[in-house]
Image (cartoon, helix red, strand yellow):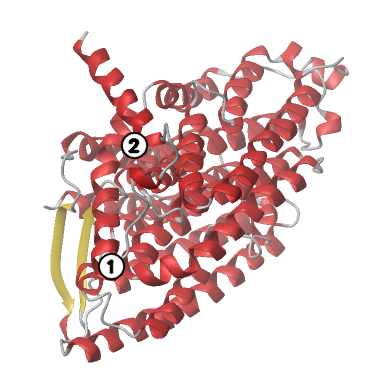
């Protein structure tokens, strides 16, 4: 079907339209960007509505030979693993464009935002390795310019650091892709192909040690993008120096390119290597959780604090992915969406405060609740969702991740749970300092959220609450694809993920059944 190419390239069409608009008509640039991005978001919602929740395979696929002699094709499709990342992208881009106005060069700014949206959507929908790599690299260029041209004081340093880290990882992945395609063709006797589905079907053909080395080349590229400890150092600088819209998209969408890649290509193409290196990646995830949380507690810059919280949250996602069981992977996928909503909202709110106070120092933001009660109330909900408060979206994802991790590596799961406590510590401390206390004159006169800012926060807060109360519509669309992924891994490598019989008495499987039964009863009423 043509719907996926339209979703991918509609923002690019909008960027081309903006490029053709005369500079003297600057007042129409933002409406065109908003309309294009909103139309793309509407198509992603249609995609979700039309998606068959019982089908664990790829849907709406389109396969066309592109460079036949090299085995490269235009191959796109969506399954339960990628669906909600596509929807998240379709939601966050129009919100970021509406919420934030560039201080200069609006034409170039909106063009880069829409090109970035096309790149992100292409990454989540590509089913050919070369096509994926092209979109993966396309994302790098607009993000570099958004940080470097519209960022804050040290923007050029942050943009260059982001570019170099990502390029290094991508270069290694490119080598790994070529080696994978060529060696798979040699081992199977078939023509060279970069088709992900065909490579996955031949996943067990490569020598074990070779597959492990290729897996590491992919993992390093994705670890940089996540970012996973210890290759995370570009993220705090990029977040701190990026414009508000750039931080929202960076946290909400771009970081998910790495975690998505770990699931789609790490687990899918290298089942044995994923299982072999799972303890290492599990450990790095736990270190990231604790490191990000501890360093966040020491930050005095509110935006930098939120940036380090992302390091901790992404560590949880890696923890879930490399549990390599249904609960862990589902929790990781759900938490990708949750983190995009919660942390994207936090960066928006920090940006709103910065526009009013022109500072990010926590010590200079005291007692804002008195002047801006609506902002304080929204910040409270979003902050508590990041903490993982029951009833909000963050709790569901973290609960699933810890349940899956407890089955795979019990003691590491216990250690990771301490990260939840630390998150409460640094976020509640920051909230207390910023919104409580006696305000000075500058803080006392700070205006509250205006109607436009309230409007962009409504869908984010609404989804934070909805997914915390009723996550079933998301989970039931993810679960068939996750089960199919695990079945594929078991079939290729002949190992079994932990079963119900391996789990502690009163395991999560029983709780899952109880929750599903409760949800079905609720629908009956």
Q: In the image, which disc is placed on residue 494? A: 1
Q: Nearer the viewer, residue 54 or 222?
A: 54
> Residue 294: horizontal and vertical position, in percent?
75, 45
Q: Tell me if I can see residue 243 in this picture.
A: no
Q: Nearer the viewer, residue 430 or 405?
A: 405
Q: Measure how far apart labels 1 and 2 are at the Cα level.
A: 45 Å
Please determine whether, in this image, residue 265 is positioned above or below residue 438. below
Q: Residues within 10 Å of mark 1 (few under 14, many from 20)?
A: few
Q: Residues within 10 Å of mark 2 (few under 14, many from 20)?
A: many
Residue at figure coordinates x 28%, y 56% from the top left: 485
> Residue 447: horizontal and vertical position, in percent?
69, 18
**Residue furthest to the top:** 525
Labels in figure, total: 2
Q: Secondary structure at mark 2?
A: helix
- Name the residue that disc number 2 marks: 38
Q: Secondary structure at mark 1?
A: loop
Could you tell whether 32 is left or right of 284 in the image? left
Mark 1 and mark 2 lie on one chain; the one further toward the N terminus is 2
> Residue 63: horizontal and vertical position, in percent?
14, 65
Please determine whether, in this image, residue 445 is positioned above or below residue 217. above
């Amino acid at each position: 079907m043509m719907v996926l190419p339209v979703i991918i390239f509609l923002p690019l069409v909008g960027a081309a339209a903006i490029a053709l608009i005369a500079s003297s008509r600057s007042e129409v640039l933002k409406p065109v960007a908003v309309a294009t991005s909103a139309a793309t978001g509407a198509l992603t919602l249609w995609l979700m509505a039309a998606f068959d929740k019982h089908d664990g395979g790829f849907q709406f696929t389109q396969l066309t030979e592109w460079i036949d002699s090299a085995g490269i094709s235009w191959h796109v499709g969506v399954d339960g693993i990628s669906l909600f990342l596509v929807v998240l992208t379709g939601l966050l881009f129009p919100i970021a464009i509406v919420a934030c106005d560039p201080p200069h060069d609006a034409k170039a700014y909106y063009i880069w935002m829409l090109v970035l949206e096309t790149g992100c959507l292409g990454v989540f929908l590509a089913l050919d390795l070369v096509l994926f790599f092209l979109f993966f690299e396309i994302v790098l260029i607009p993000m570099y310019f958004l940080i470097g041209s519209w960022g804050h004081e040290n923007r050029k340093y942050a943009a260059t650091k982001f570019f170099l880290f990502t390029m290094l990882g991508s270069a290694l992945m490119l080598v790994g892709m070529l080696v994978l395609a060529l060696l798979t063709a040699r081992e199977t006797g078939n023509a060279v192909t970069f088709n992900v589905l065909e490579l996955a079907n031949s996943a067990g053909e490569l020598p074990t040690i070779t597959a492990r080395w290729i897996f590491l080349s992919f993992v390093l590229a994705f670890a940089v993008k996540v970012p996973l400890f210890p290759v995370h150092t570009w993220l705090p600088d990029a977040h701190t120096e990026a414009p508000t819209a750039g931080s929202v998209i960076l946290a909400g969408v771009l970081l998910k390119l790495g975690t998505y890649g770990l699931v789609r290509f790490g687990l899918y193409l290298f089942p044995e290597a994923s299982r072999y290196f799972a303890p290492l990646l599990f450990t790095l995830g736990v270190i990231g959780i604790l490191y990000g949380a501890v360093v966040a507690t020491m930050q005095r810059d509110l935006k930098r604090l939120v940036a380090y919280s992302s390091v901790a949250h992404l560590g949880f996602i890696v923890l879930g992915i490399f549990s390599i069981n249904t609960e862990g992977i589902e929790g990781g996928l759900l938490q990708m969406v949750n983190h995009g909503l919660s942390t994207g909202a936090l960066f928006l709110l920090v940006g709103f405060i910065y526009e009013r106070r022109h500072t990010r120092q926590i010590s200079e933001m005291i007692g804002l609740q008195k002047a801006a009660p609506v902002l304080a109330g929204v910040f409270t909900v979003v902050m508590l969702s990041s903490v993982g408060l029951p009833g909000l979206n963050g709790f569901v994802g973290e609960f699933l991740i810890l349940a899956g991790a407890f089955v795979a590596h019990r003691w590491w799961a216990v250690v990771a749970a301490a990260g939840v406590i630390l998150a409460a510590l640094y976020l509640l401390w920051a909230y207390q300092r910023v919104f409580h206390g006696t305000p000075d004159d500058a803080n006392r006169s700070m205006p509250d959220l205006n109607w436009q800012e309230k409007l962009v926060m409504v869908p984010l807060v609404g989804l934070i609450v909805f997914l915390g109360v009723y996550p079933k519509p998301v989970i039931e669309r993810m679960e068939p694809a996750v089960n199919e992924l695990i079945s594929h891994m078991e079939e290729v490598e002949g190992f079994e993920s932990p079963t119900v019989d391996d789990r502690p008495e009163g395991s999560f499987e029983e709780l899952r059944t109880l929750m599903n039964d409760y949800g079905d009863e609720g629908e009956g009423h």
